Image (cartoon, rainbow, N blue to C red):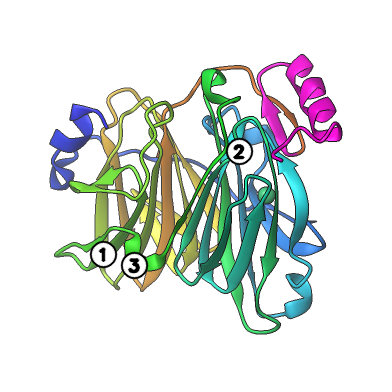
Amino acid sequence: MTATNTLVRHDNLTHPRTVERLVAGEATSDGAGVKLTRVLTQPLQRRLDPYLMLDSFGTDRAEDYIGGFPDHPHRGFETITYMISGRMRHRDSAGHEGLLQNGGVQWMTAGRGVVHSELPEQEDGRMEGFQLWLNLPAKDKMNAPWYRDIQSDQIPEFTTDAGVTARVIAGMSHGVEGAVQREGTQPLYLDLHFEAGSQFAQALPASHNAFIYVYRGELRVGDEAVPSQRMAILRNDDGADGVVLRADAPSRALLIAGRPLNEPIAQYGPFVMNMKEEIFQAVQDFQAGKFGS
Ligand code: FE
């Protein structure tokens, strides 16, 4: 983290960010027919650099998730899966295996390549969560794969006097260091739980791209209301020092920010590199069985 992040007083923001636009996302399905909403879609990758994708899934109907995500490859970025409720078993070609459940996070760095599966370990009940894709700097795209299961009780958490509970998945908030830090992209990933009538301030460097996704209730950013199931992209005005979020009723939202890489993005499905030639290479390597062992 930079010194700026730790020194800014969170109750003392003078130039909070405003909302640039609201995004509803697109209903789609992925894996073996898992229904989800793609909130951060490909046309927004440049605007929200270093983030490449955000999927939201939430259903009580087993047929919407039961197929899960059978074996599939990734190269060149990181996947961060946050399970609000449900159980998903993860296995990959690097020999990692883990169970992701209520409140837990799975952070996987695909690097030069993994093949993995993500399969539900429940036959009924609610499945709800998010998958976020975070790009890797060009110099790290071919690093060895890395993976960590972060159980719910290992996610640092604090509650403000105003009545907001913050779960710090990545980065730093109010002096609390999150479960994961990344130097290149400096991701901030917070899950915020608001009581009625509460507000939360977060310092953010003006150059970092940032957005919120409200998944319960409704938030206000300045004069702008952000309803449930909407992403709000926050403006990067010169001199902006953070964001202030307010809730009139109990609400929950993700606040996500990061330092843009400003590198070319070449994506073909689950491969995200810088150049088209690297994508051809990724497809060849995958077909030749060179991902994992
Ligand atoms: Fe995957």
Instruction: Give the magenta part as a residue range.
Output: 270-293
Q: Nearer the viewer, residue 128 or 24?
A: 128
Q: Dot 3, how many residues are within 10 Å of its Cα: few (below 14), some (14-19), or many (20+)? A: few
| Cα distance between the residues tagged 2 and 1 | 33 Å
- First in residue order: circle 2 vs circle 1: 2
> Is 10 positioned to the left or the right of 85 in the image?
left
In the picture, residue 77 is in which quadrant? Answer: top right
Which mark, by number, is residue 110?
A: 2
- Write down the residue under mark 3: 153
Q: Earlier in the sequence, mark 2 or mark 3?
A: 2
Q: Residue at x 18, y 65 (%)?
A: 162
Label 1: few (<14), some (14–19) or many (≥20) C-alpha neighbours in 10 Å: many
Would you say residue 14 is visible in this rendering?
Answer: no
Q: Secondary structure at mark 1?
A: strand
Say which element carries label 2: loop
Of labels 3 and 1, the one closer to you: 3
Q: Pointer 1: what residue?
A: 164
At label 2, the amino acid type is: Ala
What amino acid is at disc 1? Answer: Val
Q: Residues within 10 Å of mark 2 (few under 14, many from 20)?
A: many
Residue 253 seen in the current view:
yes
| Residue 271 within the segment the image draws in magenta | yes
Q: CA distance from mark 2 to mark 3?
A: 25 Å
Left or right, residue 174 beside residue 112: left
Amino acid type at image mark 3 = Asp
Check the image and report above or below for 252 versus 179. below
Q: Nearer the viewer, residue 285 or 22?
A: 285
Q: Residue 257's x, y, as percent?
A: 41, 39
* Mark toward the viewer: 2 or 1: 2
- Image quarter in which the N terminus is found: top left
